[in-house]
Structure formats: C-alpha cells, structure tokens
Amino acid sequence: MSGKLTTHVLDTAGGRPAAGVRIEVFRLAGGTREPLCEVETNADGRCDGPLLHGADFTAGTYELVFHAGDYFRAAGTPLPSPAFLEAVPVRFGIAEPGQHYHVPLLISPYGYSTYRGS
C-alpha cells in the first residue's frame, strides 16, 4: 500500500471551508529546504488530489506553508498591517510513508491549530 499526504483548511472565524488558500510543500533534509509543489484549496477547503503520494512520499521531515494573510485579504477580512498571521508554516515528520498523513489547518486571523488527521 502506498501512502499519501493530504490537507484541508477551515476558516474558523468565518465558519466555512477556506477556498483559495495557497499552500507550498517542502522536504527538509541536510539543512536544505526543497520545494516539492504548490497547490490551492478548492471550494471545500481541500486540494483536488494528494500533495504527495507514491514514490514522492518518503520518510523524512516536511513543511507546509499556508498563505493565510492572502486568503483573509481576498475574503475581505480586515487585517492589521502587518497581519498577525501572514504565512503559517507547519513542520512535521513522516515516519511511515505507507500510511495516510492528513495535516489539516484550522485558521483565523489571530490563531491556528493543526493535528494529524485521518
């Protein structure tokens, strides 16, 4: 069985899925930060496919960067200048690449939370 990495973003301040959030995916190794892909959430706050899967999904350390400030500005949410949360990096480890790793983000202009989902 081949594992995969997925995510979704929920706007907890607005009580809705966060559509149009740009997410960058990086692999971290040996002091380098390798860009792997860039995606945008759909109307359901999810990506249209896995961020990584198959041979691209290996054990190691990864980082997702969620561009929250751009999302809130596009949604018409008033933000201070500078925004409290502009980009939210979530760094995590993949120990078992045969499994499904789901890393959701719950976001508001002034806070966020994440966890390993299923």
Image: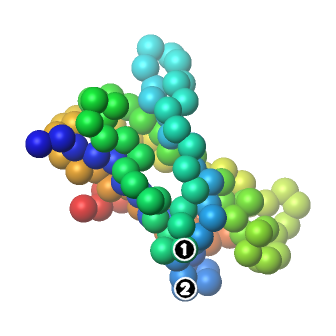
Name which residue type carries label 1: Ala
Q: Earlier in the sequence, mark 2 or mark 1?
A: 2
Residue corresponding to mark 1: 43
In which quadrant is the C terminus drawn? bottom left
Residue 86, percent from left and from top: 72, 54
Q: Nearer the viewer, residue 4 or 102?
A: 4
**Residue 39 vertical placement versus 81 (above, below):** above
**Residue 68 vertical placement versus 62 (above, below):** below
Q: Is residue 85 visible?
A: no
Is 105 on the left or on the right of 97, as rendered?
Answer: right
Residue 26, percent from left and from top: 50, 34
Q: Residue furthest top?
A: 30
What residue is drawn where x is 78% and y is 68%? Answer: 73
Is 118 on the left or on the right of 81, as rendered?
Answer: left
**Label 2: which secondary element:** loop
Q: Which mark is residue 87?
A: none
**Label 1: which secondary element:** loop
**Residue 86 vertical placement versus 75 (above, below):** above
Q: Which mark is residue 15?
A: 2
